Image: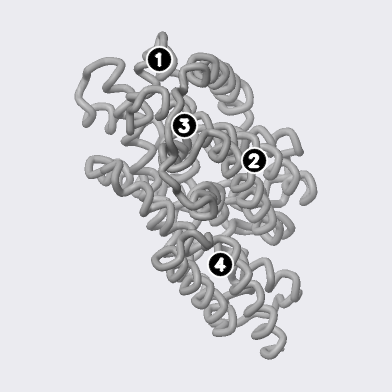
Amino acid sequence: MEFEIEPVPSRKLGFLDISVLWLDLGIGLLVFQAGALLFPGLGMWEILLVSVAGSLVGSLLLALTGIPGTLKGIPTMVSLRPFLGDMGSYLPTVLNVIQLVGWTAFEIFIMADAAFRITGLDRLLWIIFFSAWCLLMALWGPLAVIRHYIEKFVIWIALAISIWLAYQTIPRVPGYSAQGMPLLYAMDLVVAMPISWWPLISDYNRFAKSTRGALLGTVVGYTIANSWYYFLGAAMAAATGQILTPASIAMTYFGSAALLPLIVDETDNAWADIYSTAMSIKNVFPKASGRKLVVAATIAGGSLACLFSPETYESFLLLIGGLFVPLSGAFISDFLLKRDEKSKLRLDSLTSWALGITTYFLIINYVSWLGATIPSFLVSFTMQQVLGRLMR
């Protein structure tokens, strides 16, 4: 059942399992890298503020959008069918596959770059190596990865090295003049990270024993990890002056020793991207082999990793926020309306989503100080309430 999209007959993950899963998925080199985008735009206290606030808002949206899929035991893209219609759900499926292949590429590149700094071996060799590693994890299946890889091994070394890096970094942060990045724009960058996971959330939370446990576990685990790693990523950039996170870590005491366990932890982020790519595609092609799709997703992500550029990362995060924050607003709104009829296409939902997207990018491009997350969410949420009631 782990590679199928039918309702899960047996739920095995409790609150602690879900908490550890999302705590671990909120930890990673790319979260450090996203945190570095906040420096030197904000002072360190401002970075701490937006890291906590943005993580809490984003994690709450992430958890709420997972409720329908958790209740029915189905993957996220399948849970969108009542909301957008069967054919309408294909649009976010395509967008999600694109973002997941992009995330896979970013993850594999950042691991390869870190391994290159430790060993000096060519990045291409490491791209091939980590692609193969993550492929094997995806073929292993989510329940085995969560219970035997993340809970028993990876999360503990990740937490230990995080404490070590904080001890080495925070006392070395120099005084500097912030360059005036708008706080709400900075929060958009923070919210984008948990929002990037919401098209995947039910792929894993569908295995939860209870909806409440899944909701609370997601909020607690992801808020803690995302807040801490955004702040620490900015602190490392300030302390070392390095743009790329692996370079920042390499400059700390025993930097190479610190990079190695973080590389190991990063593999589960790429694993989740690869597995969920397959689950998303099965929303359109339900009879396709999940394992074959996993292989195809790995090849696509690994190939794209060769073209990675750090300069594209901020735009990538904002693109994700612009597409999926409004989708979450309309989706949560429609869930509250309790509409569960079958249809091929729901124009009211697509319209609400489109208006939210328009709001997000207008704000980002013209009045970024206003922050696009909350306004775009409210626009899509409100329009779905209005149009949904009219369609009813």
Q: Is residue 137 left or right of residue 76?
A: left
Q: Earlier in the sequence, mark 4 or mark 3?
A: 3
Q: Residue at x 58, y 28 (%)?
A: 150
Q: Position of residue 367 (x, y in %)?
A: 45, 66
Q: Earlier in the sequence, mark 3 or mark 2?
A: 2
Q: Position of residue 36 (x, y in %)?
A: 42, 36
**Dot 3, how many residues are within 10 Å of its Cα: few (below 14), some (14-19), or many (20+)?**
many
Q: Closer to the observer: label 4 or label 2? A: 2
Residue 223 is labelled as 2
Q: Closer to the observer: label 1 or label 4? A: 1
Q: Position of residue 110 (x, y in %)?
A: 35, 33
Which element is circle 4 on?
helix
The answer to whether marks 3 and 1 mark residues whose Cβ atoms lie closer than 8 Å is no
Amino acid type at circle 2 is: Thr
Q: Name the colour scheme.
A: one colour
Residue 252 is labelled as 1
Amino acid type at circle 4 is: Leu
Q: Earlier in the sequence, mark 3 or mark 1?
A: 3
**Dot 2, how many residues are within 10 Å of its Cα: few (below 14), some (14-19), or many (20+)?**
many
Q: Is residue 331 left or right of residue 71?
A: left
Amino acid type at circle 1 is: Thr
Would you place residue 370 above or below residue 231 in this image? below
Splitting the image into 4 quarters, where does residue 95 fall? bottom left
Residue under numbered circle 3: 233
Q: Closer to the observer: label 4 or label 3? A: 3
Amino acid type at circle 3 is: Gly
Q: Residue at x 23, y 40 (%)?
A: 306
Q: Is residue 230 visible?
A: yes
